Amino acid sequence: MAVIAVIGAGPSGMMAAIAASDANKVILIDKNNKLGKKLYITGKGRCNVTNSKDISEFFDYIPGNPNFLYSSLYTFTNDDTIDFINRIGVKLKVERGDRVFPESDKSSDIISAFEKELIKRNVLIKLNTKVTGFERLDKKITSINLSDGSKIAADYYILCTGGLSYSQTGSTGEGYIFARKLGHNITKLMPSLVPIEVTEDWIKELQGLSLKNVELKIIDNKNKVICKDFGEMLFTHFGLSGPIVLSASRAINYHKNLRASINLKPGLSMEELDKRIQKDFNKNINKAFKNSLDELLPKKLVQTVVILSKIDADKKVNLITKEERKYLVQLLQNFIFNIKGLRPIEEAIITAGGIDVKEVDPATMKSKIIDNLSFAGEILDVDALTGGFNIQIALSTGFLAGKSLL
């Protein structure tokens, strides 16, 4: 029976420990005072554990090295995740976008179930235990150094320390330092699934406004569409957030001089929207322009649109020209913001970049440099869009890393 030390008790680490425990003695180490600290805040505290789409569709939602994940995602699929979580006592439900959540809407139920399973499998859980480095001899790790001066020796080590996102949950990047000292290359670390900052100062007037069923396009200075999405978004005091914005942020890492274009009425053609506006104007024929858009737009957006439309706010709608109306239509379907950049990586949901996957065996998650080291989860240079895909990657890579040591 081998001794396996798993460093990091997030979803990948807990799953690696569970998978490895079938025929090994497993020690699960984490510097936090509880398991799965980052899981507590995923899915707005509801824990979006996976997605119910066919596993073959997952790769369309993984911009970060999808081919590397083929073995892990097919070894432990989303169906396996659902079956496993049901088996350890948590009932699940599927919501919009095929997102899978616990029926209770409580991430704590998922974490408690994982903890019970770890205890049931006699995994030794060492919380409040900070790893400071590794001792090695040639191509093998001999022990882990801890902050209290003690060491833990094992036969195999699985590094699951996460990325740099949400550092308050313990993801402070020390795993990258450990891996680099052991000879691994770390690709550029960037925020992914993070809000966008814009240059327009008047965005503050829209703070807190949430929009549904809008289309977002990210456009470069040659008017090429870098990416586009449809769904929900949110205005903040610094810029844009919400599901479709977070997904778009991943592409922004690789381009400069970008603009965000929001189509507030994507379900209507320009002609249809023009007719809709004319209809509203006819209903409000004796009203000032500033009082004519209440049925078309959220109240908080009206004043901003009036200003940007360049139409006199007090002008009677029956005096608005065809050209002015046409400009209004274009504004509503091409609401432009100049992108300043992304919010800091500490605010990102996930980290893009990490352990260079060329140095990791995708069939086992074992290091190609250190004989008794494996990796799983966000520490790897893999990342996906929102919707439960990132947690599934963590669980799949964790399972494969653990099972490969049996």
Image (cartoon, rainbow, N blue to C red):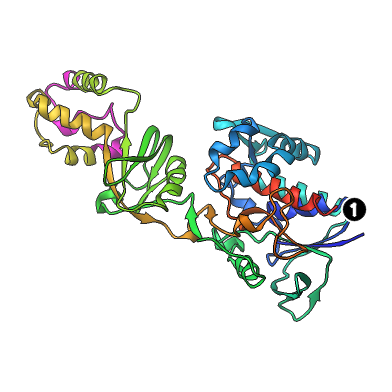
363 vs 27: above or below:
above
Image coordinates for residue 188, horizontal then vertical, percent: 50, 61
39 vs 295: above or below:
below
Compare residues 286 and 337 and report the one nearer the observer: 337
Q: Residues within 10 Å of mark 1 (few under 14, many from 20)?
A: few
Residue at 72% x, 69% y is 128
Q: Quadrant of the N terminus?
A: bottom right
Q: From where the camera sits, is residue 310 visible?
A: yes
Secondary structure under the numbered disc 1 in the rendered image: loop
Residue wearing tag 1: 23
Residue at 51% x, 60% y is 189
Q: Based on the displayed image, in which of its 4 quarters is residue 58 positioned?
A: top right
Is 292 colored magenta in this rendering?
A: yes
Is 95 colored magenta in this rendering?
A: no
Compare residues 143 and 42 and report the one nearer the observer: 143
Compare residues 353 and 169 and report the one nearer the observer: 353
Which span is picked out in magenta?
Answer: 281-302
Image coordinates for residue 133, horizontal then vertical, percent: 69, 74
Image coordinates for residue 94, horizontal then vertical, percent: 63, 31
Q: In this rendering, would 79 be left or right of 223?
A: right
**In this view, which residue lies farthest toward the bottom?**
149
